[in-house]
Image (cartoon, grey):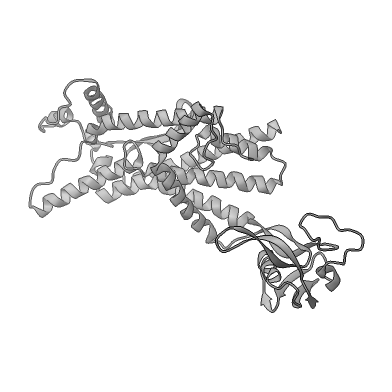
Amino acid sequence: MDVVAFIVGVVVLVVGLAVSIALHEIGHLVPAKRFGVRVGQYMVGFGPTLWSRRRGETEYGVKAIPLGGYISMAGMYPPSPAARAADGGTVSGRAGGGFFATMVQDARAANDETLDGADDDRVFYRLPVYKRVIIMLGGPLMNLVFAVVLMTLVLSGIGVQTVTNTVASVSACVPAEAGQECQAGDPPSPAAAAGIQPGDVIVSVGGQEVSDFATAAALIQAAPGQSVPIVVDRDGQRLTLSVTPDSVTRQVVDQDGQRVENQVGVIGVTGTLDYVRQPIWSGPIAAVDNVGTVAGIIVQLPVKVYETAATLVTGAERDPNGPLSIVGAGAIAGEVAATDAPVVNRIAVILSLLASLNIALFVFNLLPLLPLDGGHIVVALWGGIRNWWARIRGRAEPAPIDATRLVPLTFVVVIALIAMTAVLIIADLVNPIPLFG
């Protein structure tokens, strides 16, 4: 393995992940500032700060561990009961005693520090529901947009490797069995006898136009022993050649997906492997399709992680379509970069991997659980429903939802995420998913 190429692949993925996180936080930052919310910090990564700079009221920075990020908005939650009492309100919703109650009180105290009575209108919780939803949706949507851009670069910029209708080679004969060598005295292949040459572009077969080799091959296979006119483009000139495919026994896939032996037509040509650029809308379509696939995996994530943990005990092979940690994704990027393949192939695979990671970030962050963006969206929508119901019944608008009460649930979710991440990291180190068989 080329160690340097492997390291380059890992670094490219880590940088791509950091860019994805930065874009995610920009998706929150821009609408928050547009709606007038005070943003104290915009940080990419966790841990010690490597670099930061303050511009206006916001500190922008990069931290050492590029596995997340955050923006610090004023008043993510309403003020605590104690703070409201200090402003002349009534004290209610006491957290009581115990470990989780202490967590609630600490969360309220930390939130209160972001509030500024002199500038109280510039806080998140006072925004209309739709603005809060837009801010929280902004991050995941940026990941989806980035995934669409990456998939479009792969499919429409680089293209999909396809066997084209340009002839790559013409066989001297057609062996009775696939894989056999031509022997002395074997008759020439139908393509050679008809004068087909490497570089010819097959335009039509039997009067039907073709745009790829698969279509041309299917028409030829369907006409064993029959004279078929084949039109080729040779250096800008169209030639019509009469070709009679040999009838040979080959394994084919029937309508039920089973491999059976059948008589098919063969003329003895191979197509040129090339990159075919797809329509510009292919990237968005592929990204949306991938969203469904990733959503299916994430819905089953606890089960999938349990199955992955079981492979650590049994030594069984992991599901190649199962979840990966960032360690596993980095290892795959490294292996791809170190393969003996054209550079463009490796770039396409790594870009596709980054696109999949961004789709995973999009779907995962929409889960309706705090501290994920989807949890904040649910809280905002529930608050809006409560306000609407109060207006319908002619009652005063209720106090904002005190989401700090959900801190214990948030704590459980975080612990579960840490545990699942640990299992996947260990599995990716001890029992990785093989990239090449």
In this view, the residue farthest toward the top is 98
Which residue is painted at 47% across and 46% down in the image? 359
263 left or right of 121 in image: right
Report the front residue among 124 and 399: 399
Looking at the rendering, in which quadrant would you find the C terminus?
Answer: top right
In this view, the residue farthest toward the right is 184
Report the front residue among 436 and 201: 436
State whether residue 37 appears in this view: no
Q: Quadrant of residue 234?
A: bottom right
x%, y% of residue 409?
28, 32
Q: In which quarter of the image is residue 111?
A: top left
295 left or right of 370 in image: right
107 left or right of 91 in image: right
Q: How many labels does the image show?
A: 0
Which residue is painted at 17% across and 29% down in the image? 83
Looking at the rendering, in which quadrant would you find the N terminus?
Answer: top right
x%, y% of residue 5?
68, 35
Q: Is residue 76 above or below residue 158?
A: above
Which residue is painted at 34% across and 46% down in the image? 135
x%, y% of residue 65?
49, 29
State whether residue 313 appears in this view: yes
Report the front residue among 268 and 133: 268
In this view, the residue farthest toward the left is 394
Q: Is residue 200 above or below residue 239?
A: above
257 left or right of 291 in image: right
